[in-house]
Image (cartoon, grey):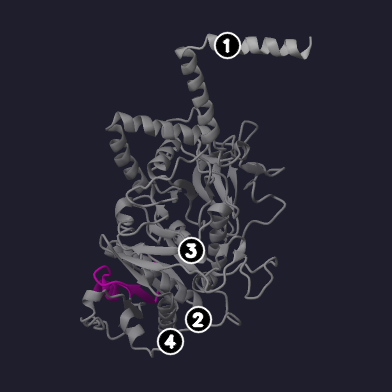
Amino acid sequence: MDVSTLLVRLDESVTGLFSQWNLWTSLIVTVFAGVLAHYVFTHQDPDTHPFLLARQAEGSLVRQSGESPVFRSRSAPHSMPLNSGLNVKEPGANKWSRGRDGDVRDIWRQAIAGVQQEDGGAATKGAAARGRILTVRGADKAIEHSLDDITRQINLIGTHIADQGGHRVAIYLPNSIELIATLFACAFYNLTAVILPFDQPDDAVISMLRRSAADTVVTAPGSFPFDLVVKSYPALRQLIWVVDEGSKHMDWNEVPQGAGGSVNVSTWQDIVSDSPADAGKDLPPLEGQKPPSDVTIFWKPKKGQQEEVVRFTSANLIAGIAGQLAAIPTSQRIGPADLFVPADSLANTHTLLLTLAALFSNASVAFNSVASQADDLAVAIRGVSPTIVAATPAALLKTHQEESARVNASPISRVLHHLRVRKLTGSGVMPPPATWMGNKLRLILTAERAGAGTPPLSAAVLTDLRVFTGARIVYALTAAKVAGAATQTGFYDYRVPAGEPEGGCFFGPPTTSTEILFKDMGEWKSGDDGSRGEIVVRGPCVAGEEAGLGVAGQLRDDGTVAYV
């Protein structure tokens, strides 16, 4: 067949095609082209590869009798030591050299030093970016504190307590800058910090003081039973009142009658204002200092049970912070552009370590005194626009109920919500960021408290919350003797496993600072059909290096931990 014949036949075919073209043909072609264009221009790859979610933990090659293999995160292989430090480098050190693990003091040093911002791959010249520290008062009032002023308060309060012979400092305050400043003052001046849960009954406060052997208390008027404590706890030697602006004119140095002058009473504001203006501006030098003293935490178990006293070393806390920071992908890491709000009590170890992690990352932090007293996320973040929030499961469940009622009120809202959920769970892609209650949240951190009766968050509820808020959610399993989290869900893990029982939940793999195993517990035993039993956690962030959680768990097929 020659070329002319081929062209004639091609011309006849095209002519025949268009001679039969009609309205229906145009409609079919238009729909097909629209579907193809929509797929090409809207298709997105999953936020992470599905294979990375299918096997999130690796077991050891051998196991002991009555135990499961030891499981670690794939980011912390068995051939390497667990993550134990913050890789703190000295000024002028090579960026590729290995730094120190660091301690609690290095967190504040990094907060005031700031971080150089990068622009197009090169660090910008000029002052380093530093986060802000805010106190939220009322619905729309946020007060910013100078980091240099906070440094001065840390030095003056630490010096005052040490000069008065204090050794063990009980901190009985709501979420506030004074709580964090006292914690750092204890670290810099070799004092033992004891963080008490706030707003407790009088007999519980006295009991915690006795069990911790505290000789100094930093607290707020109206919440601390001073008269009763002086009579019932004669070991108290110092009391520092944190007085608000409206009460400064009152005399807070008066000692109750009968105390015999044994208690040295002063106010935070007087200690700071009565010192010379140049005093306390510089932190103590790092060289020659002893490691910081321990930090004592009271773990709140189920209602009606006595709090468990746990002593964490500075190394435990630093390892827990390192595990939390390593769990955030590099592209999503916390930085100066973030505003972090601890919407849970800082007496909760998980919330405290997340706050310290935010300070170390030079993020801004906003403290709200009501955050530790109400399981209401909207109240806790009122007055600020956070990007990262640490919230309680109860607060998230309340938010889920409120937002579900709003969505279910409209058929269109239900359809849109269903489409966003399908994109999230089916395609593994977060929907476009939402502006929830005027806040541009990108990350919510929450935790199950093992054995404490915390309301569980199912995978379906977490999915709804991600869609409602437009934020990724990391769900952790925490315990009394674990600084930070024992295990937690992956940053990009949006799955709702098929066949999941109603209300079922899972807590992800171990962090890079922990490893877990399951010890036989009653009917729950490890074998060829799987690993189950009492959850046991080991690692540098665990007080005493190992702790049984007292609850039965199992390792799922995808390498994540769940209750049995």
- 160 is higher (above) or lower (below) than 517: below
Q: CA distance from mark 1 to mark 3?
A: 63 Å
Q: Which residues are magenta?
A: 210-233
Residue under the image location 45 percent in, 84 percent down: 281
The residue wearing badge 2 is 283
Q: Nearer the viewer, mark 3 or mark 4?
A: 3
- Identity, as a three-letter code, of the amino acid under mark 4: Asp
Q: Is residue 542 left or right of residue 255?
A: right
Q: Check if mark 2's residue and mark 3's residue have beta carbons within 8 Å.
A: no
Q: Is residue 427 left or right of residue 242?
A: right
When asked about the image quadrant of residue 198, the answer is bottom left
Residue under the image location 43 percent in, 45 percent down: 433
Is tag 1's residue or tag 3's residue first in the polypeptide sequence? 1
Q: Position of residue 56 (x, y in %)?
A: 61, 42
Q: CA distance from mark 4 to mark 1?
A: 98 Å
Q: CA distance from mark 1 to mark 2?
A: 84 Å
